[in-house]
């Protein structure tokens, strides 16, 4: 089933923003706070939350129900669970909620990037960037993704032994993101990748102490190095009389109503966000899916059958004709969402379900909980058929939200789906992969969910 919105069915994460939200009545003043505890002074219940957010939520949900309060990550917090709550959160952006990042992310992401700005400025920036993530752009970009991916896959298949998938997939996805952002320009990939690794490691650390030997201190040093480098790239581009039609070109050519361009600082902040958001997420989704496919040979076989008819270079229309690819990607991201959650903060006292949530309290968007909720049959099972047109378990809004929702829904969602579909179609059609026995597949959740081994694989070309 293809919707008029583009290649893939419209996602339930695309919440209807005309949704009538009962945020003003009844008045929150006389309502009680949600049930729950604040935990220890200062620390609250943070340690338990960080140990396993899933277990933390499950325990309290069975004790208090789907609305409860706690104190985590330095803030009084209310957890709201269930699809209706998810819709209420997404519809509240800019009305009674705004984006909230952990202290580490706030310091490492630039203050002027899309994730940090709000209101009209946020909408305007999205309008400026949106054309680079449209299907029209993707249509022209499919051959670039195919060429880069094929080069990497051929290299993997030519290796005499096994290799670790995670870093290899990172190199591949980073190169694709660079092509989208910088077009034909040459950039120092090893330099940027090295610093991105240290930078990402510092994003979700519980203690943000800036000392040279701490993870966070190293992340700040990496940010400084990257910003210095990106400033040079932008400055060189700004000196040209004509800009190529890539994303950096759009940022440089943009003018506000008074005719002012974006400052170099703003452009560098945006580049840093896009490079980050544009590769580690797709690495997580595709690598984890390849692992699942290696563990479920019957599903892998169905995937191979789905691409059997592929001939010649890939096209957007060719990908459209293979909905099973989307089912595989969706189920992989449902089971292991690359981004397990996000945070919002209330901008005024607000009523929800008979409770008062005071101004300044944090509200997590738990993507992981939504994907394991009771609307899914046997949610712990890897079962791509749940996204097929017969069962279509995802129809209830707020149950499947790998890309978030509302005004902050992932800007790169269509790009990501096209990129991942190209990779998956090529791998299914031309390659086999098997897991190296004896590796440690226990999952680590931070900064992105991945098995400890990084997934050791042997890849071979078919035929
Ligand atoms: C599987 C791949 C991806 C997943 C699962 C994913 C997930 C998400 C999620 C959940 C959010 C919302 C965070 C929030 O609510 O605060 C988000 C935002 C964002 N994503 Fe993605 N993303 C992916 C790929 C990409 C790619 C490829 C790009 C760009 C090249 C991208 C760019 C962004 C940007 C710029 C935002 C911020 C949007 C805003 O604040 O308005 N993402 N992503």
Image (tube, rainbow, N blue to C red):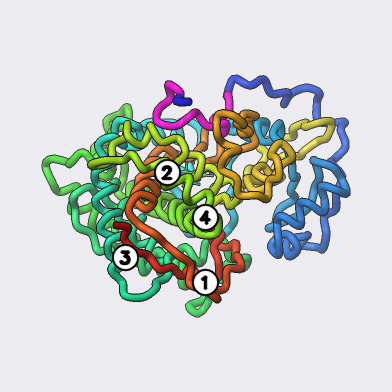
| Picture quadrant of residue 405 | top right
Disc number lying in front (3 or 2):
2
Q: Which residue is drawn at 26% across and 38% down?
A: 250
How many angstroms separate mark 3 from mark 1 (CA)?
A: 19 Å
Give the image quarter of residue 447.
bottom right
Please, what secondary structure does the residue beneath circle 1 have?
loop
Q: Quadrant of the C terminus?
A: bottom left
Judge whether 349 appears above or below 233 on screen. above
The first of marks 4 and 1 along the sequence is 4
The numbered disc on residue 453 is: 1
Which residue is labeled 2 in the image? 305
Magenta stretch contains residue 6: yes
Task: Assign a secondary structure to mark 2.
Answer: helix
In the shown orientation, is residue 184 left or right of residue 334? left
Say which label, 3 or 1, has the lower sequence index: 3
Q: Considering only vertical position in the picture, is 348 above or below 225?
A: above
Q: Earlier in the sequence, mark 4 or mark 3?
A: 3
Kindly indicate whether the residue at mark 2 contacts the one at mark 3 (C-beta within 8 angstroms).
no
Tag on residue 157? 3
- Which residue is located at x 25 percent, y 36 percent? 140
> Mark 2 or mark 3, which is nearer the start of the sequence?
3
Q: Position of residue 219 (x, y in %)?
A: 46, 68
Of circles 2 and 1, which is in front? 2
Helix, strand or loop at label 3? It is helix
- In percent of width and height, residue 33 lies at 85, 40
Which numbered circle lies on residue 297?
A: 4
| Disc 2 Cβ-to-ligand 1 distance below 8 Å | no
Please identify the residue farthest to the left as the structure is shown: 241
Q: Give the range drawn in magenta.
A: 3-16
Q: Which numbered disc, 4 or 3, marks the residue closer to the eye?
A: 4
């Amino acid at each position: 089933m293809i919707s008029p919105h583009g290649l893939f069915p419209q996602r339930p994460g695309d919440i209807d923003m005309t949704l009538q939200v009962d945020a003003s009545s009844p008045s929150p003043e006389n309502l009680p706070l949600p049930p729950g505890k604040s935990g220890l002074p200062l620390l609250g219940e943070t340690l338990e939350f960080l140990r396993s957010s899933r277990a933390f939520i499950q325990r309290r949900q069975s004790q208090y129900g789907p609305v409860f309060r706690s104190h985590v990550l330095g803030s009084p917090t209310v957890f709201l669970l269930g699809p209706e709550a998810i819709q209420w959160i997404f519809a509240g952006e800019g009305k009674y909620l705004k984006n909230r990042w952990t202290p580490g992310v706030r310091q490492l992401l630039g203050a002027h990037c899309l994730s940090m700005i709000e209101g009209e400025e946020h909408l305007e920036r999205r309008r400026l960037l949106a054309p680079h993530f449209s299907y029209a752009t993707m249509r022209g970009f499919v051959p670039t993704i195919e060429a880069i991916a094929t080069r990497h896959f051929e290299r993997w298949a030519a290796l005499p032994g096994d290799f670790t998938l995670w870093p290899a997939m990172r190199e591949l996805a980073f190169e694709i993101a660079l092509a989208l952002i910088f077009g034909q320009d040459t950039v120092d990939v090893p330099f940027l990748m090295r610093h991105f690794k240290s930078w990402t490691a510092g994003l979700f650390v519980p203690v943000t102490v800036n000392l040279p030997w701490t993870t966070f201190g190293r992340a700040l040093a990496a940010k400084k190095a990257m910003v210095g480098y990106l400033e040079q790239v932008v400055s060189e581009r700004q000196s040209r009389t004509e800009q190529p039609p890539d994303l950096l070109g759009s940022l440089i050519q943009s003018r506000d109503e008074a005719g002012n361009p974006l400052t170099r600082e703003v452009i560098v902040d945006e580049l840093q966000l896009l490079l980050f958001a544009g590769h580690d997420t797709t690495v997580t989704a595709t690598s984890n899916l390849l692992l699942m496919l290696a563990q479920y040979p019957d599903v892998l076989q169905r995937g191979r059958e789905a691409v059997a008819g592929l001939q010649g270079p890939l096209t957007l229309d060719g990908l459209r004709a293979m909905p099973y690819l989307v089912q595989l990607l969706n189920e992989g991201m449902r089971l292991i969402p690359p981004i397990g959650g996000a945070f919002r903060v209330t901008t005024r006292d607000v009523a929800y379900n008979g409770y008062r949530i005071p101004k300044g309290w944090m509200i997590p968007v738990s993507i992981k909980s939504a994907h394991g909720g009771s609307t899914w049959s046997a949610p712990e099972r890897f079962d791509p058929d749940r996204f097929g047109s017969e069962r279509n378990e995802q129809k209830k809004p707020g149950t499947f939200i790998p890309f978030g929702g509302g005004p902050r829904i992932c800007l790169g969602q269509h790009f990501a789906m096209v990129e991942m579909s190209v990779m998956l179609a090529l791998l299914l059609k031309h390659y086999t992969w098997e897991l190296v026995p004896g590796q440690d597949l226990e999952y680590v959740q931070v900064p992105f969910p991945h098995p400890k081994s990084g997934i050791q694989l042997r890849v071979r070309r078919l035929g």
